[in-house]
Image (spheres, rainbow, N blue to C red):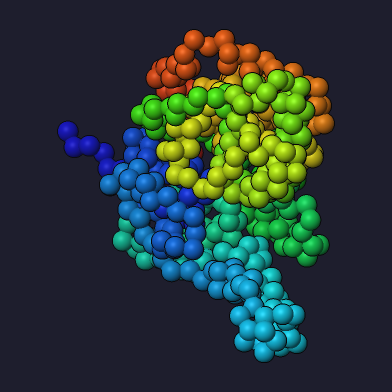
Amino acid sequence: MMKERFKKVLMIAYGFPPIAYAGTHRTLRFCRYLPDNGWMPTVVTIRENADLHNDFNLLKRIPREIRISRTRTVDVWHRVWKRSLSPADGRNGNGGGKPGLLETLGRLFRSMLLNLFSIPDHMLLWVPFAVIRGLALDRKEDFDVIYTTSPPHSEHLAGLLLAKICRKAWVADFRDPILDNFCMQDLPAYRRIVNKLLERVIVRNADRVILVSDLYCQAIAGRYPACRHKFTVIRNGFDPEQFKRIEPCLYTRFTILYTGSFYGTIMPDFFLRGLKMWVESKGPGVRGDVQALFYGFGSRRVETLARELGLEDVVKIFGFIPQDEVIRKQKGADLLLFIIGFDEQSRGVISSKVFEYLAAGVPILALIPEGDALKVISTHAQYYHVIEHDYPGLMKALDAAYEGYLGKSARPAEPESRHLDSSPFSARLQVKDLARIFDEMNRLN
């Protein structure tokens, strides 16, 4: 009996391997397991770019049968703004000192240009390239569904245009919200107006909208009650196969590990000040047996504050490392540090690293507000929860974690395979929800 043909989905994803940003991994996980559920993806993304943070090992995880179509793009940030940030080279005739009038006007012009082409984000100019490539591919493949994922939120405009022109069902996936985003609080009024308009256009035209958080889903449903039937939550997750094959790193000291970036209201200050109080309350032997390691972007604040606090011997910062190495270090750590802001909009944040932490099977120190992330962690992990500015609570949590470290006769056992496979955050299970949405859209199309 001939096997039924795969249904076809066109996935528009600016962030895709080898780009190594956090959002890349969600799309990669979906691509890996959609064929097992009857859907064959074709991915439209940008060409490899040396200016971006890349992890070329991620390319090895893309199944061979999946077609990747890469396009050109025009990134105003890299072409205009980064050039304006370069140090003065003396060409303005003032020996590299105070900028002259022409240079000042040039920088002002470049800033205006960047703002003009950064509404809603600086990847806006990729949209025509994605649409043209998508139209060409659809003529050959006749896709059943179109899927877009953001950020960058501008790429949903490509999904909108392709869905209208090709008369196909369109599923929009919000890895981060457009409006209920703690990073967007300081936007000027005109940018907020544009974002509201963009969200309205996407919600009213998409056939289904996917969110990663219950609170974000409730917020957007409250703004568009007539579209409530369109909203679905598919959380971030992890690939169980990836965690099974990676051996843990072996540390010789009590190791607190943070992986990820610091930005917006996600800051290390509370933890570092509490860590200083804790190590100073212990003897020198404990201080020499503790290390706090930070991997990711935006760690300059960690380095500066650690130096001010006299924690240079305890706190170490590192830059970007490949994901496999991140997982190896997560699995070998004794305590995984998770930080989000305590503002109202951060209550809905569930960053992708939460699910990596869960898969690693290591206790979590959660410096977070009451919200979606705490609900997930409290149900699926051993954890210590501390609220903002509760320094006694933080020191008590560090005491408990260190006592647990001292009480271990060996490194923690690797999580059982069946635990990873049966987790509700396993990509193998989550992709079934996505495939069901595609099946429903295909029937209605």
**Residue 98 is at least partly visible in this image:** yes
> Left or right: where does residue 184 sit relative to residue 67?
right
Q: Does the image show residue 434? A: no
| Residue beneath the point at 64% across and 21% down | 285
Q: Position of residue 193 (x, y in %)?
A: 76, 61
- Note whether 353 is above or below 391 in the view shown: below
State which quadrant residue 105 falls in: bottom right
Q: Is residue 373 left or right of residue 137?
A: right
Q: Residue, x 38% and y 30% (percent of image)?
A: 246
Q: Which residue occupies the foreground of this view, 75 or 439?
A: 75
Residue 385: where, in percent of width, then height?
A: 71, 23
At 56% from the left edge and 42% from the top edge, which residue is drawn? Answer: 295
- Tell me where residue 13 appears, x and y as whole percent: 48, 54
Total tally of numbered discs in the picture: 0
Where does residue 441 sit, x and y in percent of width and height? 48, 44
Q: Is residue 189 above or below residue 64?
A: below
The structure residue drawn at horizontal position 37% and vertical position 46%, both measured from the top left corner, is 57
